[in-house]
Image: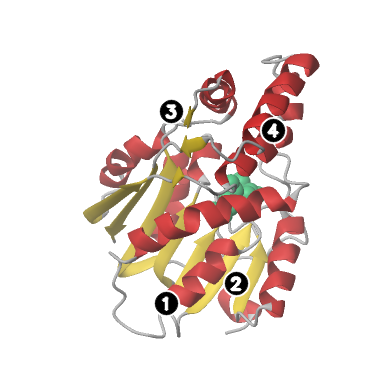
Amino acid sequence: MNEQQSITKQPVPAETEKGGNYTIDEKNLERQQLLAANLAPLTGRALQCIHLPQKDARILDIACGIGETSRLLAKHFAGAAITAMDIDNNLVQTAKSISVKENANIEFINADATNLPFEDNSFDLVFSRYLLMHVPDAVTILREMKRVCKPGGIVFAQEPDINASNSYPASWAYDKIKEYFLALFVDGLIGRKLPAYFNQIELQNTGSHADVVFEVNKNTVRRMYRLTAEALENALLAKKLATKNEHAAWVAELERIENDASTVVLTHPAIAVWGTK
Ligand SMILES: C[S@@+](CC[C@H](N)C(=O)[O-])C[C@H]1O[C@@H](n2cnc3c(N)ncnc32)[C@H](O)[C@@H]1O
């Protein structure tokens, strides 16, 4: 399937504006790579519960970032035709070039999830991960996801529930992760609300899977949190949630923990919910 065939509702603009509520500065792509590495087993376990009827299913990955989820879907559902989209065209271009290098046959486009450029009833699985927490009206996007899903197809969303992130030995910097994330992200507690949203838009047979990472003798979660703290500097300063010095102290403490191999970390849960149209 080529781009022209799948974009049937309206032309995609050359470059869609970045989402206005998205507060993470994604200049350092290693952050998205580490996020994806941490989440891959959690998403993989949730996807074990999803059964698509045919091998050549059509799958849409909403807000694909650098395409880590798209490539995960391509591996998990071998034979499926994957289309992936994101509002940030720089990320879309990066996703494309990584996927070409890795021989993953995925179609990437630049589009806004609130107005998907696809016909009704187009996909067997419509997937999104860590998008809805950043948007002012998650239900609007879920409705769009349902619209482009085929009758009998599956809508799937995986989102965090930022009720705690813990380290041992304990550190104030991990309390700040919760405080700053909840203050900056549109809805950091959206994970627990997903079943209600799925009911609201009348998706059927809702299933769910909650999962965490407990990091021991590894340095991907600890490093990801430090890189995320760096990527939130502008947003924290703009909203006057921290001064430059307070932000620098937070990053320095996260970096100290990152370099202390004896520290263990427990992430907040990622909650996956799915339902049938
Ligand atoms: C935290 S990243 C998650 C990326 C990927 N889904 C993953 O789990 O690895 C959130 C992504 O949402 C994208 N995004 C934010 N608002 C969007 C919108 N309205 N439409 C499409 N993508 C959006 C951002 O550009 C970013 O790539």
Residue in the picture at 59% in, 47% down: 219
Q: Residue 47: percent from the left, percent from the top?
A: 36, 64
**Can residue 185 be seen at all in this image of the molecule?**
yes
Q: Residue 144: percent from the left, percent from the top?
A: 46, 54
Q: How is the image coloured?
A: secondary structure
Q: Amino acid at mark 4?
A: Glu
Residue in the picture at 43% in, 46% down: 213
Question: Could you give the CA–CA distance between mark 1 and mark 3, rounded to whole angstroms?
Answer: 33 Å
Residue 56 falls in image quadrant: bottom left
Which one is earlier in the sequence, the residue at label 1 or at label 2? 2
* Label drawn at residue 7: 2
Which one is earlier in the sequence, the residue at label 2 or at label 3? 2
In the picture of the structure, the residue carrying the numbered disc 1 is 77
In the picture of the structure, the residue carrying the numbered disc 4 is 255
Which one is earlier in the sequence, the residue at label 1 or at label 3? 1
Name the residue at the left extreme. 205
Q: Nearer the viewer, residue 269 or 62?
A: 269
Q: Regarding mark 1 in the picture, which secondary structure is present there?
A: loop
Question: Could you give the CA–CA distance between mark 2 and mark 4, rounded to whole angstroms?
Answer: 44 Å
Residue in the picture at 61% in, 79% down: 104
Badge 3: few (under 14), some or many (20 or more) residues near its Cα, within 10 Å? some
- Is residue 12 positioned above or below 223 on the image? below
Badge 4: few (under 14), some or many (20 or more) residues near its Cα, within 10 Å? some
Q: Regarding mark 3 in the picture, which secondary structure is present there?
A: loop
